[in-house]
Amino acid sequence: MQTTAPTEHTLLEPLATSSGDEGLLEISLGPHHPSTHGVFRMDAVLDGERVVKLKPVVGYLHRNHEKIAESASYLASMPYTDRLDYFGSLTNNWAYALAVEKLAGIQVPERAEYIRVITAELTRLQNHATTIGFLLQEMGASGSPLMYGFRERETILDLFEALTGSRMMCNYMRFGGCRVELPSGWLDRVKKTVTEFPRFLDEFENLLTSNEILLARTQGIGTLSKELAIQGGVTGPVLRASGVNYDIRKVDKYGIYDRFNFKIPLGEHGDVYDRYMVRMLEMRESIKILEQALRDIPAGPIIDPKTKIRGFRPKPGEAYGRIESAKGELGFYLISDGTGNPYRYRVRPPSFINLTLLEDMCRGYSVADLIVIFGTIDIVLGEVDR
């Protein structure tokens, strides 16, 4: 019998091994594929064009984020969080800051809390707008919907650049508040963006929501039941599209979210169309939150003056801080042994957890549907392979 050197594929569980699998075709999509959102691979077994089995293959972008953080000071790890979900740098900052603040019992000034909400909801707007643009691109649409989404994203990135000095890997949060005061005129620019954004949403919906091609490609496709979504631990728009009323902004009321009046959009069928619509409606709710935050933001300090940033050594203990990022529950779990570095540092990334039910969502659908279903999970590989 001929023997061969072990390959990467031999490390995976074989997909087509049962006696009833004769005639099925096993294919690999990725890791270098325009529809896999980075270096991500799917091993699929097909019966014709129908997906019979599917196995996500991750690890191509492993960055050792968690182990690096255990070798660095608490503050030194803050810039690394920017690079987890690079569409949500500021929300990543907030989740990590929240965990450290719980660990050390640090209080955050009122003004800083409002700034955190404003930056988080701006992040949600630009994330969802581009996610929907990518979804249409993967359906075979021309580049227009994606470019419209990126146009709005660029406007928000202009605001982030003015605030943090960076357009993409923004580093602004600090334990006990924010790094610097808002630039002069920045809030006025935010108000202008928030005022104009609903017009974009109206145009975007008129272009897409009732489009017969979008309806045919999304309704009844990639359904995920409420029960399976809960069992799988998925969160964010994917969970809410299945009809589960769970949003950490309402459940934990972290920061000052309990002060704002907003609704949680829910789907009925858990299909691709519901995941699309939940994101569209969430952007409208983010506008409501931003309008209230901009109206009520107080004057005052942006960081707790008692917080000791340099030489920061929290008492021994453990804490878990979590937020509702644009993709779902983003959490940081920290254990302190009283030194300047975390003894344990663990990230709970929504992109990775939400991938676990990809096979259940794709089984029985076509290869073309697979790409669209995968797009509605909205992953970023920097967060998957942390």
Image (spheres, rainbow, N blue to C red):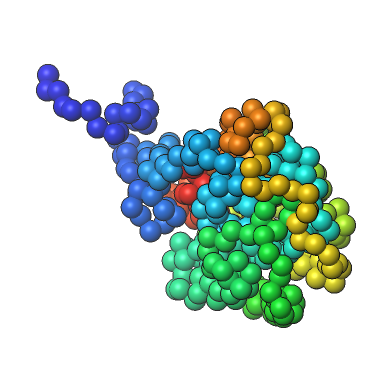
The residue shown at (53%, 64%) is 168
Is residue 130 something one can see in this rendering? yes
Residue 337 point in image, percent of width and height: 64, 27
Question: In this view of the protein, which residue sits in the foreground, 193 or 132?
Answer: 193
Q: Is residue 36 left or right of residue 323?
A: left
Vertical order, 60 against 338 (above or below): below
Residue 34 point in image, percent of width and height: 38, 58
Task: Farthest residue to the top: give it.
Answer: 1
Q: Quadrant of the N terminus?
A: top left
The residue shown at (58%, 54%) is 272
Question: In this view of the protein, which residue sits in the foreground, 234 or 343?
Answer: 343
The residue shown at (48%, 49%) is 382
Q: Which of the 4 image quadrants contains residue 280?
A: bottom right
Residue 78 point in image, percent of width and height: 58, 49
Task: Farthest residue to the left: give it.
Answer: 2
Q: Which of the 4 image quadrants contains residue 303?
A: bottom right
Residue 293 point in image, percent of width and height: 81, 66
The residue shown at (33%, 52%) is 32
Is residue 330 something one can see in this rendering? no
Q: Which of the 4 image quadrants contains residue 231?
A: top right
Task: Farthest residue to the front: give it.
Answer: 311
Vertical order, 100 against 192 (above or below): above
